[in-house]
Amino acid sequence: MEILNRFFSRKEENPTAPESAVPAGEGMPVTLDQLKQLIPIRNMDEEDLMTFATERRAEFLPAGSVLFEPGSHDDSVVYLLHGTVELSVDKTGAMEVEAGTAKARFPLCCATPQNITARAKTDVHVLRVSCKVMNVGASRGETSIPTIDTQYLPPRSRNSNLVNAFIQALEDEDIQLPVLPSVALKLRKAIEKDVGTAEAAGIIQLDPAIAARIVQIANSPLYLPARPITTCRDAVTRLGLAATRNLVISLTVKQIFRGTEPFIKQTLHDTWKRSVHLSSMCYVLAAENRGVNPEEALLAGLVCDIGVVPFLVFAESFPVARIDPEEIAEALPYLSGPTGARVLDKWDFPPKLMEIPLLAEDWFHDSGEHLQLSDIVMLSRLHSYIGTPKMAELPPFSAIPAARKLKDNALSPEHSLRALHQAREKIAATMKLFD
């Protein structure tokens, strides 16, 4: 339930309260209203927030002060309540965070800043919060099937007949969730029984188009082939059974993104295009950082937004003549994650894949010391927003726990744009697989 609460609360359109005049040189009282703006500690119970507010004062630091720098060791995160702070990454780039903006709702850094330096550009008041208080990095255990709590929906969606009917049908299990395409399902079950490459190739060849694509992938530059191959069996041998399974599932998922009503059809098409781009970035990022299988990352990116399919199919068949695009667009971000987790649970995906729709934009999820599948998808999503209006709503890159796990320990807009430019051919080659 904690995952779900964090998933919904991060999407609330609750702007940061404007900063008020603060006397310089003294600590500032922390109010309950201020804490309710700070992500993710605003998810705490109100009673705990009230206690927290009465026990703490914001720390005053004069202009020029260093809030933290590489090598700092502090089991806390820092929020900016008043003033302006400059964040610099290895002296290669800098960004400013001003109190009262969307970025100031997030911490300035995770507990270990590593290569980030934060310097007060003006007099500032900051709030230091222990990671234990925030419950950052707490173990969640296995992912449970999420429920949708309507209190987190925006008013329009909360009062929507379509949305309420969909949620009720989902909870009553009276809704048709998409089915994993047959060739992918047969292959996965066969591999679970330790079949050989010949048997796996035989299953794939039940779908000639998929078989041809698997051969094409095995011959692609992504696998640096020493010699061309022409048979599906040789392709499976080159790729390996696990990679072949993930690639076959990935190639067949496109069959699910289909609709008939023009708006629904276009929305599904656009979602699939974004999913392909995201999955390609996941593949490249995983390939460049050890610890996550690239083919599994590719699959995770493709199913990240699988939850939009059941809702759009339901909307298409809803017994109301007019489809309201604005109503659907507003509801999708709130329904996609929990619904996607249900789809992947029905497909019997492992927990680390089932949680992907919920964690893709949970910027403060900390999976532990080492880079995990959820980190790859989250960082790829973050990369995909660079240069778009969505960037204004993102936390400072230094605040994202997953960012410190990259092999070069650097994640900044400048570094990310440079990395994307360098990897554009690999991303294009990966996307071409799904043309």
Image (spheres, helix red, strand yellow):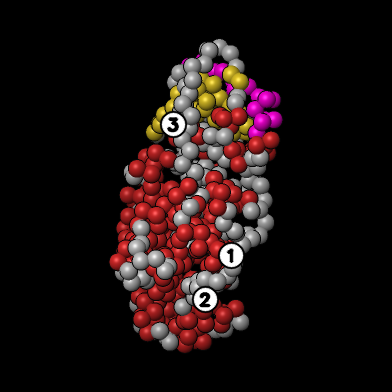
Which of marks 2 and 1 precedes in the sequence? Answer: 1
- In the displayed structure, 179 sits above or below 303; it is below
Residues marked 1 and 3 touching at CB (< 8 Å) = no
Residues marked 3 and 2 touching at CB (< 8 Å) = no
The disc placed on residue 161 is: none
- In the displayed structure, 387 sits above or below 268; it is above
Label tally: 3
SS at mark 3 in the image: loop
Part of the protein shown in magenta: 48-65
SS at mark 2 in the image: helix
The quarter of the picture where the C terminus appears is bottom left
The disc placed on residue 101 is: 3
The structure residue drawn at horizontal position 52% and vertical position 25%, both measured from the top left corner, is: 81
Say if residue 86 shows up in the picture: no
Image coords of residue 407 (percent x, y):
50, 48
Residue hosting label 2: 241
Magenta includes 62?
A: yes
| Most foreground residue, 214 or 35 | 35
